[in-house]
Amino acid sequence: MRSVSRERGLSAITWLIVIAVVGTGVVIGLRLVPVYLQYFTLVSIMEDVAQEAHIGDHSRRELWSMINKRMNINGIEGVGHDEIGIDREGDAIKITADYEVRRPLLGNLDAVAHFKKTVRSR
C-alpha cells in the first residue's frame, strides 16, 4: 500500500495574507523613510554649522541664517525657528532641534515621530 504524500506550500488565502502584510509594511516604510532622511539631513546640517571655524563669533541670528539657508537648499520643510534652539555655553555653541512630524499612514491612521538632537561646537 502506498502512503499518500503530504502536499507542501501555502494555500491561496495564506498567500493573500502574506501579500497584504508585506504590502502594509511597504506602505508604512514609504511614508516614514522620508521623515527619517530629513532628520538625518538636519543633524548633518547642525553638525556642519557647529564645526565651522570661529563659530563663537557669530550671533544667534547669523547662526539661524546659516542653518536656515542649508535647510532650504536640502529641502527640509516643517522645521522652523521655534524648533531649533541656539544657546551659548561659554565659548561653545549648543544647537538643539526638538520637533514632531505627523504623516498619514493608512486611512485615518497617522504616524507621529518625535525627534530631539543636541549638537555642541568644540
Image: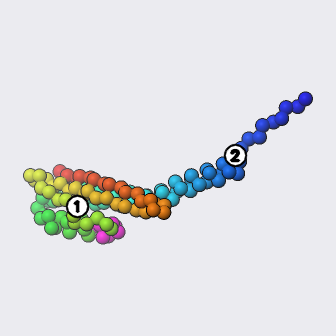
**At which x and y percent is residue 98?**
26, 56
Query: Real-space Cα distance between discs 1 and 2?
Result: 52 Å
Tell me if 86 is positioned left or right of 105 in this view: left
Q: How many marks?
A: 2
Q: Is residue 40 visible?
A: no
- The residue under the point 70% across, 51% down is 12
**At which x and y percent is residue 11?**
71, 48
- The residue segment tinted magenta is 70-76
Q: Local crowd at mark 2 within 10 Å, few (<14), some, or many (≥20)?
A: few
- The color scheme shown is rainbow
Amino acid type, residue under disc 2 in the picture: Leu
Q: Nearer the viewer, residue 118 or 114?
A: 114
Question: Can you say whether 4 is above or below 122 in the image?
Answer: above
- The residue under the point 27% across, 53% down is 116
93 in the magenta segment: no
Question: Can you say whether 108 is above or below 92 in the image?
Answer: below
Q: Nearer the viewer, residue 120 or 25?
A: 25
